Amino acid sequence: MVEGKRPNILFFVAIVVIAAVAVFGGRWYMYVAYASDPFDEVGISLNMKMPDLIRAKGCEMLKARFEGKTLPPAGCGENGAW
């Protein structure tokens, strides 16, 4: 193996991981902060796959905007209540 090629591969992997986090994290944030409908399928899927702390923050943001107007989306409510 050529010694000079390894840092380029690690750099490429790092860029791909950062890009994926930016795309999926950005899409998740757009859902919890700006969605006009809490039942966006992609947003719900992303929110449900987030770690507990981030999911709780997302549900808190959705609750602040939609509580009393509609049922909670999947992953945010318990027994149909916020």
Image (cartoon, grey):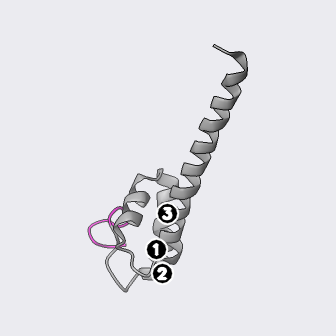
Badge 1 amino acid: Leu
N-terminal label among 3 and 1: 3
Residue 17's quadrant in the figure?
top right
Q: Which SS class for mark 1?
A: helix
Q: Is residue 64 left or right of residue 12?
A: left
Question: Which labelled disc corresponds to residue 65?
Answer: 2
Nearer to us in this view, 27 or 44: 27
Q: Is residue 64 magenta?
A: no
Which residue occupies 63% across, 43% down?
A: 15
How many callouts does the rendering have?
3
Residue that numbered label 1 is attached to: 62
The residue under the point 58% across, 43% down is: 16
Q: Secondary structure at mark 3?
A: helix
Mark-to-mark CA distance, 3 and 2: 16 Å
Look at mark 3 in the image and give the residue it sits on: 28
Q: Which amino acid, by three-letter code, is at mark 2? A: Arg
